[in-house]
Image (cartoon, grey):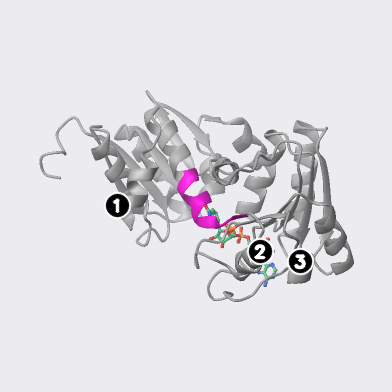
Amino acid sequence: MEKRISGTTGLFILLGSPVGHSGSPAMYNFSFQKQGLDYAYMAFDVKKEQMPQAIDALRLFKVRGSNVTMPCKSVAATLVDDLSPAAKIIGAINVIVNDNGKLTGHITDGIGFVRNLKENGVDVSGKKLVVLGAGGAATALQVQCALDGAKEISIFNRDDEFYKNAEKTKEKIGEAKPEVKVNVYTLDDQAKLKSEISQADILVNATVVGMKPLDGQSLVDKKYLRPDLVVADTVYNPLKTKLIEDAEDLGCTVAPGKGMLLWQGAAAYGLFTGKEMPTAEYQAYEK
Ligand code: NAD
């Protein structure tokens, strides 16, 4: 490392709180070194209210780019100079690219989700999806799937503070991609959930259910699944949720959340460096 960092090394950072557990510094620094790029990556614990200062610092120190994580993704979108089409619709970003002083915000969660499906042999184009969830991850992937040509998206959420997000997402997709049919239902309507899943190509869990401490739980009765249904999850801790285990048991094609995490990071790396991240090498190194 001491030989790699010099007076010309370009800096990339992670902003958010907490960031101590993040795997991003290891993944990006490994990739920079592997590809002989004169860059380094550091994580900074920054609270939401400190984001204006952090963005000023990013400009001052000519930081080349930044990832943004919870709880700073929405406020960051209001502080940059420009937004990608998906970020404009979603109103949140997880990547900032500093192009000679012009900061552009992107959101790669949905891109990572779609790529993870593709890596598992599934194309969202022309497909009907049932997506459980209306939070950050859900909104990002719903918008990206609409932009990437999904035919229909049925959103289910429990009647909590996130439910109105689903209504907003329906409205926003309606404006940007009117040909995509979006339906919003409450999770209480189990008969609807069952019938929507029976007509869907892809089922996605984008809620926190399945994630620790809700591991071992699933919002979907195993009886609603069938072998030709593709089942994806955004949860990556544990690596296999109960939903993914149930789906595997029935022989469904599955796309667990760890792949989405890897590919959203790889998409950011592409925006940062213009290069494909050495994901296979990193995965082998990580094991
Ligand atoms: P969020 O807080 O924005 O949204 C939470 C969602 O869970 C909402 O839809 C809420 O209604 C729902 N929910 C919460 N408790 C519930 C319950 N008991 N029953 C039913 N629904 C419930 O969270 P988020 O940032 O969207 O994250 C959701 C999951 O996706 C997390 O597990 C997170 O780690 C994961 N995630 C993964 C990636 C990835 O790259 N794989 C990226 C972002 C988020």
Q: In the rendering, at what x and y percent does residue 85 appear?
A: 62, 31
Residue 2 relative to residue 50: left or right: left
User: Mark 1: which amino acid?
Assistant: Tyr
Q: Using the numbered discs, state the Cα–Cα distance from disc 3 to disc 2 in whole angstroms.
A: 22 Å
User: Mark 3: which amino acid?
Assistant: Arg
Quadrant containing the N terminus in the rendered view: top left
Q: In the rendering, at what x and y percent does residue 89 appear?
A: 67, 37
Sooner in the amino-acid sequence: mark 2 or mark 1: 2
Which numbered tag is attached to residue 285? 1
Q: Using the numbered discs, state the Cα–Cα distance from disc 1 to disc 3 in whole angstroms.
A: 40 Å
Depth check, mark 2 against mark 1: the one in front is 2
Residue 107 relative to residue 266: left or right: right
Report the span colored magenta: 254-264
Is residue 198 within the magenta segment?
Answer: no
Ligand 1: which quarter? Answer: bottom right
Count of residue discs:
3
Q: Which residue is mark 3?
A: 158
Nearer to us in this view, 235 or 200: 200
Residue 217 in which image quadrant? bottom right
User: Mark 2: which amino acid?
Assistant: Ala
Residue 13 in which image quadrant? top left
Residues packed near mark 2 inside 10 Å, few (<14), some (14 to 19) or many (20 plus): many
Residues packed near mark 3 inside 10 Å, few (<14), some (14 to 19) or many (20 plus): some
Q: Which residue is mark 2?
A: 247
